[in-house]
Image (spheres, rainbow, N blue to C red):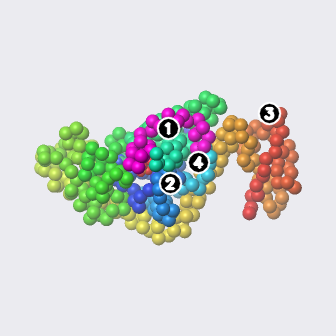
Amino acid sequence: MTMRRVFSGIQPTADSFHLGNYLGAVRQWVDLQDSRDAIYSVVDMHAITMPYDPETLRRRTKVAAAQLFAAGLDPERCILFAQSQVPEHAELCWILSCLTGFGEANRMTQFKDKSAKGGAEASSVGLFTYPILQAADILLYHADEVPVGEDQRQHLELSRTLAQRFNHRFGKTFTVPAPYILPAVSKITDLQDPTAKMSKSSSSPQGIIDLLDEPAAIRRKINRAVTDAESVVRVDDDAKPGVTNLLRIYAALSGDPAGDIAARYGDAGYGGFKKDLGNLVADTFAPIRERTAKLLDDGDTLDRLLADGARRAGAIAKQTMAEVRDKCGFPPAILAFYSERSRLFGHCPRLLICNRTLLANHTDRGTIQYSRAGNVSEAPVFPLEA
Ligand code: AMP
Ligand code: TRP
């Protein structure tokens, strides 16, 4: 039986991922490598929907990839690549944009939240169409499941809708992706405001724990986390959101059920509970922090790993786009290749996918002639070796 495929993406919009990203997404990415055909991306094109600095983006894309490898992604067991290195994402995004209603896009709550500060009028159109690019990311790879945190549920609903709409209009092409969201860790909250999500854009430095924070800073932040006056460690989302959030983090990192942990500390106060949790988080993150630094010291290896990821992801994306282009009524982008040295033509599997028959090689003008359903046409060929 073939393995189910997972796809997920994470934005390189900060110098470090945070505890919410780690528990809500990255840890699942690492775990799923064993049971799924796993493809992951540092979605740098999503990171330009708000004003940004190119050098900072370049650095953060590498830091993001380094953290993901350091957290346990293994290039032998998954594909990790930078989104911008596979141009088919932008191409499919355009096609899906033309299938998305303006009102439909306008209902996306993340756009409303993110544009609230400067006003929708001042926001980029890219921020508005962001969820369509996300749908393209997922659909290009025919992902069955998408591991994310709760905040992405609405975006995944749009991806499902667009897959179904395309299939309905142009014939079965895309897999309709299902969210993979673990309720216990899908919304880690801000340590200073336990009713809000821990977030790189809105949390204060004291409210957020970074994967790359120093161990001492991690312990201090947990120590100062907002709790309540009751002094009893127990799960109660409504009355004790701060303690409940800490219990969730503790349970996720230790593997023990939150109820057992609560029973262990009971009414002995929060001091010992916070101290142990601070050590647990610091000990979990310390080795990831060290491995990230090592990977960043060897920038060439990191670049090579990403390029290899882009090559492998690109091969899948190109296959999908050949079929999509054909179904949409576009001529093929590239149908064949030739070797400069031998002047021999070969043709891609795409020729077969789209039911085309090769009629002639026009070496002189660098094209091939093909037929499809009785129609004869011509398409450019590209050299295999530069
Ligand atoms: P982002 O930082 O927005 O690119 O998010 C990367 C991944 O982390 C997505 O799957 C989010 O759903 C997830 N995520 C972000 N913040 C949290 C949080 N506070 N709790 C759980 N998951 C989160
Ligand atoms: N929008 C996601 C976030 O902010 C990131 C993302 C982009 C993504 N493309 C994706 C997540 C595809 C899952 C699948 O977290």
Circle nearer the N terminus (3, 1):
1
* Secondary structure mostly seen in the magenta stretch: helix
| Amino acid type of the residue tagged 1 in the rendering | Ala
Disc 3 element: loop
Camera-nearest label, 3 or 1: 1
**Percent of width and height locating residue 165:** 58, 31
Circle nearer the N terminus (3, 4):
4
Given contact means CB atoms under 8 Å apart, are the residues at marks 1 and 2 in contact?
no
Where 105 falls versus 343 (above or below)?
above
Circle nearer the N terminus (1, 4):
4
Q: Residues within 10 Å of mark 1 (few under 14, many from 20)?
A: some
Disc 4 element: helix
Residue at the disc numbered 4: 89
Res 9 visible: no
- Image disc number at residue 105: 1
Camera-nearest label, 3 or 2: 2
Q: CA distance from mark 3 to mark 1?
A: 37 Å
Disc 2 element: helix
Asked if the magenta segment contains residue 280, the reply would be no
Give the residue at x 24% y 56%. 222
Residue at the disc numbered 3: 373
Camera-nearest label, 2 or 4: 2
Q: CA distance from mark 3 to mark 2?
A: 42 Å
Q: Residues within 10 Å of mark 3 (few under 14, many from 20)?
A: few
Highlighted range, magenta: 93-120
| Amino acid type of the residue tagged 4 in the rendering | His
Residue at the disc numbered 2: 48
